[in-house]
Image (cartoon, helix red, strand yellow):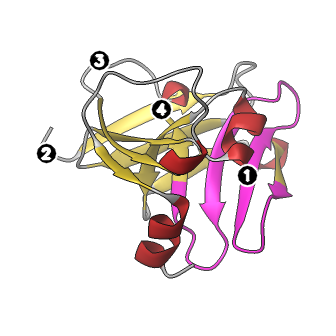
């Protein structure tokens, strides 16, 4: 997917919807302990530096999960909506939140050093440890 694509999605109850613009079909997988605790498994995420438009924002609650990031969810149904960096507003949205399309491709796994042994992914991807992630993003 080389062209710019607009995608929509919504939470389970429909009170919160989102429209995003992307020029990539890349999905990153985060194996950190917080993502696994939050979602019951790794987070399969699509990243956005902008162009994220939520409707129904009055139904979104956030949880400050670290000094640098917060996680958003629907107050009514609990659907996970985003992981957002506090400083620059960078978003990672669960790919399952977005409607349709089988053209997503897993291209990166982060916090690979925290991945438990009981699962593995078949895709050959770039893999970063937690230390490498913080070094790359200046955390």
Does label 2 or label 4 sit earlier along the sequence? 2
Horizontal and vertical percent position of residue 121: 40, 24
Horizontal and vertical percent position of residue 75: 87, 36
Mark toward the viewer: 2 or 4? 4
Secondary structure of residue under mark 1: strand
Does label 1 or label 4 sit earlier along the sequence? 1
In the rendered image, the residue lying farthest to the right is: 76
Query: Dot 3 corresponds to which residue?
Result: 102
Pointers 4 and 3 in contact (C-beta within 8 Å): no
In three-dimensional space, the C-alpha distance between marks 1 and 4, rounded to whole angstroms, equals 15 Å
Q: What stretch is highlighted in magenta?
A: 63-91
Quarter residue 93 falls in? top right
| Image mark count | 4
Mark toward the viewer: 3 or 2? 3
Is 86 part of what is drawn in magenta? Answer: yes
Q: In which quarter of the image is the N terminus?
A: top left
Query: Dot 4 corresponds to which residue?
Result: 95
Residue 81, relative to residue 85: is it above or below? above
Query: Dot 2 corresponds to which residue?
Result: 3
In the rendered image, the residue lying farthest to the left is: 2
Task: Specify whether 97 is left or right of 36.
Answer: left
Residue 120, relative to residue 110: is it above or below? above
Query: Dot 1 corresponds to which residue?
Result: 71
* Nearer to me, 68 or 84: 68
In three-dimensional space, the C-alpha distance between marks 1 and 3, rounded to whole angstroms, equals 26 Å
Residue lying at 46% horizontally and 77% vertically, measured from the top left: 135
Secondary structure of residue under mark 2: loop
């Amino acid at each position: 997917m080389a062209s710019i694509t607009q995608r929509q999605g919504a939470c389970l109850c429909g009170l919160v919807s989102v429209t995003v613009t992307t020029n990539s079909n890349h999905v990153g997988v985060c194996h950190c302990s917080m993502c696994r605790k939050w979602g019951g498994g790794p987070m399969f995420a699509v990243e956005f530096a902008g162009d994220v438009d939520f409707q129904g924002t009055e139904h979104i609650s956030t949880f400050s999960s670290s000094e640098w990031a917060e996680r958003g969810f629907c107050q009514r149904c609990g659907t996970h909506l985003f992981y957002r960096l506090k400083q620059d507003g960078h978003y990672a949205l669960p790919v399952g939140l977005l409607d349709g399309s089988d053209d997503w491709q897993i291209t990166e796994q982060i916090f690979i050093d925290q991945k438990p042994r009981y699962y593995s992914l078949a895709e050959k991807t770039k893999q970063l440890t937690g230390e490498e992630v913080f070094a790359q993003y200046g955390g």
